Image (spheres, rainbow, N blue to C red):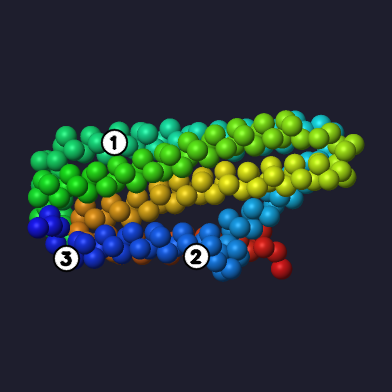
Amino acid sequence: MSIFSPLDLVALAWFAGAWAVYALVLEHTAYGRTGLNSLMNRHRETWMKEMLARDVRIVDTQLLASLANGTAFFASTSLIAVGGTLTLLRSSDGLLDVVANLPFGLATTRVQWEAKTIGLAIIFVYAFFKFAWSYRLFNYVAIMIGAMPPFDRKDTAEAKDHASRTAKLFEIAGRHFNRGQRGFFLALGYLGWFVGPWVLIGATTAVVLVMWRRQFISESQRAIAGP
């Protein structure tokens, strides 16, 4: 017998389905290529090509170090979040009373609470692995930049191929960072499940709509896409 009600299972399926569908549309469809992430990938490629013509590349390495440091920050934050969720397992009794007394709160058993908490921890662990791998890939990009042919060979096939491969690796690093950040955002929606299944459905929908808006119809997207 399931420890969750049918409505809980429907809400969880809505959460997982919304996450999966949003990721698939964003990363694997023509519509997704109009999003902010895809537009920035084109600028990553342009950056690597333009760097070939520069003799001094100190600014490029500083910019890359800034991106890597930001990724390391999120990876560290993920570990803190994992630790925070695990502490909820030790405070179940008191928190259960608080949730039950909320206006929209529902009575939750200890087993349900612990299962939900473990699910939240899994989301943050997923985010950590994405951020950590992205950080490692940014280090690889730095190595590729260090191996970039000098500017006086920028027109050779070898140099152009190296810039293209570096840009591709750069894109992959950014993709994993975006996936980790998406996990963070959706974790906010998942928190609604601690109040009730309807709150999970509503919070997940709200988070996905916010992410979609920022990707496709935000001022940032229009600024990058141009006229």
Q: Earlier in the sequence, mark 3 or mark 1?
A: 3
Query: What whole-number distance in Å separates the C-alpha atoms at marks 2 and 1?
Result: 32 Å
Question: Badge 1, how many Cα within 10 Å: few under 14, some, many 20+?
Answer: few
Q: Amino acid at mark 2?
A: Val
- Give the secondary structure at mark 1: helix
Report the number of numbered marks.
3
Quarter of the figure with the C terminus: bottom right
On the question of residue 200 being in view, the answer is yes
Which residue is at 69% across, 45% downward? 165
Task: Say left or right for 88 vs 142.
Answer: left
On the question of residue 74 being in view, the answer is no
- Relative to 167, say whether 56 is above or below: above
Q: Which residue is mark 1?
A: 84
Q: Which residue is mark 2?
A: 25
- Relative to 70, say whether 110 is above or below: below
Q: Which residue is mark 3?
A: 6
Quarter of the figure with the N terminus: bottom left
The label on residue 41 is none
Query: What whole-number distance in Å separates the C-alpha atoms at marks 3 and 1?
Result: 29 Å
Query: What whole-number distance in Å separates the C-alpha atoms at marks 2 and 3?
Result: 28 Å
- Relative to 43, say whether 90 is above or below: above
Which residue is at 88% across, 45% downward? 155
* Spot occupied by residue 148 in the image (x, y as percentages of width and height): 76, 35
Q: Amino acid at mark 3?
A: Pro
Q: Nearer the viewer, mark 2 or mark 1?
A: 2
